[in-house]
Amino acid sequence: QTSTDRERGTLRFICLRCSRRSIFFGRFIGQMTIQSLMVLLLLLVVIGVGVYNGSATLTHLMEMGLIMFLNIMIVIAPFIAFMALMSAMFDTAKQSIIVATILCGVCTFLFAWLSYHVPFTSFLMDLIPGIQVWGLVRETGWHTFDYMWVPLIQTAIFLGLGNYVFARRPL
């Protein structure tokens, strides 16, 4: 996001109108809004099909749709925040994507290997975005939110680091 604007020179123009913090968090909120609209549209279609088939009551489908919507949005938030951090750190969008892909793969392998051989380091696996999804699969209903503290903390850390990097990088 921001790396492309920095590369083109439009970020310098945008910073005349608003602060770097508002640009960084505004981009994150914009991405989350786009994703939430797509997920909401998909869930409305699923609820419509469920009502059409008569498989459950509308209130039950609406409740399950709300739970799924919140779960999906909380699960994807760290990924979007991580890519915002990568975009703030690197000069081009291509660089950001390549480094993020390599970093996620290497860290997952390294932390899994380390937690297997040195069991007390298994807490490092919580640093990887999306690691709590396996816990979500085993739960149903509102109990899925028992695992939501991990992605919320990850999102806060990635956004904090991204804001710090973005504020200190030259435009």
Image: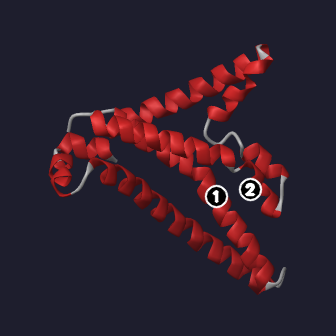
Sort mark 1 into few (<14), some (14-19) or many (20+) by Cα contacts within 10 Å. some
Q: Which one is nearer the viewer's eye here, 45 or 19?
A: 19
Which residue is label 1 attached to? 72
N-terminal-most mark, 2 or 1: 1
Residue 157 appears left or right of 93 = right
Quadrant in which the C terminus is drawn? top left
Picture layout, residue 84 above or below residue 117: below
Q: Which one is nearer the viewer's eye here, 23 or 10?
A: 23
Which residue is label 2 attached to? 145
Residue 6 x %, y % = 23, 42
Q: CA distance from mark 2 to mark 1?
A: 11 Å
Residue 94 appears left or right of 31 = left
What is the number of the mark on residue 97?
none
Label 2: which secondary element: helix
Residue lying at 44% horizontally and 36% vertically, measured from the top left? 161
Picture layout, residue 132 above or below residue 63: above
Sort mark 2 into few (<14), some (14-19) or many (20+) by Cα contacts within 10 Å. some
Residue lying at 83% horizontally and 54% vertically, measured from the top left? 139
Residue type pointed to by label 1: Ile
Residue 19 appears left or right of 150 = left
Asked where in the image residue 60 lies, by quadrant, the reply is bottom right
Taking the view exactly as shown, the residue that stands out farthest to the top is: 117
